[in-house]
Amino acid sequence: MADSLGAFEQAVLLSIVRLADEAYGRAILKEVQARLERDVAAGAVHATLERLQNKGLITSRLGSGTPVRGGRARRFYRLQPAGLRALNDARAAVDSLWRGLKWPLRGLQYDHDARSFA
Amino acid sequence: MTTTPGPSPSPDRRPESVRPPRWAEALLGLLLPSDHAETVSGDLLEEYRETVVPSRGRRRADAWFVRQVAGFAWRATWLPLMIGLAIGTGLGILNLVETARSPLADDDAGAMLLWVVALLGVWSVAACVATWRSERFVDAVKAGTIVGVMTIFAFHVASIVRVNMFLDLIRHRGDWQNLVARFNGSGFRSLRTYANYEYVKGTPMAIALGAIAGSISGAIGGVMSVVARSARKLPDSGP
């Protein structure tokens, strides 16, 4: 199994998956903020993108700028096969951890007959 | 029924006309690697203009922009900052302990030279390590400069503490007689006040020297890093 992804790394990678061809820096920042329902520092997103690129999980290319950006180029990101495997592995790991438990957890009463938590 | 489009916003109210603080934009440009400076600053500018200014107003948007730049600054500098603080604080504590043991012993020129050479070596290694992943020579110089500045700053603060703790003893040292003579002709009433004044006045120069020495050490560290990486990439010679 690949090195496990942190929660924030997963959030960034899944944002790239959702945004597809529109996955550039600012769009990824807004998508992560919307999904996590909290403000996120731009530096945190860019540091994570750089780390994911160094790990070979994503690649990037330069795209055109827009007037609102002062004409500055955008950097678009794309998931690589290694990134896809890492996301699938992360989801499989979480599923394995939760197997036998019902979400959301309410209490810690164990039903011995059903062999599960109520 | 035809509708007439509304008037376009006046030039100074279009999103593209609003700018964050220029000094913050300039600082961001210094902090970011050259291949990311344009795209990252463009992302921040787009968010600032399209989301933050309309929702928070100009002043709070400027504060938001400065906070974002501070975040980038921290990420770019925290490691050399911490290394420099640790080295300077450690040396400062050593100096305090040595003064407590032998308050009247003058500084030994040979020992001080050894310390300086060792310090420059440590700064070079720190710069080499800090930029091993980025592989950018300019990052090594930046890292060395920050390590140098923070080391000297922390050591200088510790020296001021040392002077205040041991003034009554160290004023009788041979290497303090020049300062005592200057105090006698200065018009200050208290040697403690004068000594603190001298040390505080000397702080900018000390930090500037730390920055220069640190940047030179950083350059050496950058060269070390390039040589080490080239050596790793050399092909093995055949039998």
Image (cartoon, rainbow, N blue to C red):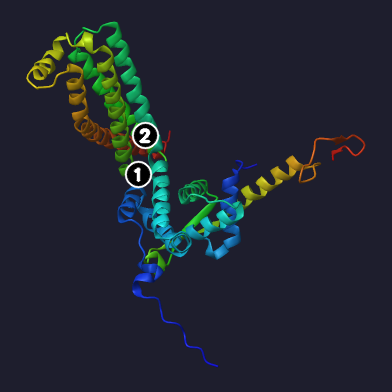
User: Within 10 Å of the Cα at label 2, are there few (<14), some (14-19), or many (20+) other Cα atoms?
Assistant: many
**Mark 1: few/some/many CA within 10 Å (<14, 14-19, 20+):** some
Q: Amino acid at mark 2?
A: Leu
> Where does the image place residue A55, in percent across and percent down from the top left?
52, 46
Of B237 and A69, nearer the camera is A69
Q: Tell me whether the residue at label 2 lies in contact with that at label 1, contact meaning CB atoms closer than 8 angstroms.
A: no
* Residue at the image point whose x is 73% and y is 45% from the top: A95
Q: Position of residue B130 (x, y in %)?
A: 38, 36
The kind of residue tagged 1 is Arg
Q: Secondary structure at mark 2?
A: helix
**Dividing the image into 4 quarters, which one contains the C terminus of chain B?**
top left
Instruction: Work out whether residue B40 can be spotted.
Output: no
Q: Give the letter of the chain under mark 1.
A: B
Outermost residue to the front: B189
Q: Nearer the viewer, mark 2 or mark 1?
A: 2
How far apart marks 2 and 1 lie (CA) works out to 18 Å
Q: Residue at (42%, 45%) from the top-left corner?
A: B71
Residue at 29% of width from left, 19% of height from top?
B161
Discs 2, 1: same chain:
yes
Question: In the rendered view, does B97 fall on the left or right side of A19?
Answer: left
The quarter of the image holding the N terminus of chain B is bottom right
Residue placed farthest to the bottom in the image?
A: B1
Residue at x 21%, y 7% (from the top left corner): B105
Between A84 and B119, the residue placed more toward the observer is B119
- Nearer to the camera, A117 or A17: A117
| Res. B81 mark | 2
The disc label shown at residue B136, or none:
1
- Which numbered disc, 2 or 1, marks the residue that appears first in the sequence? 2
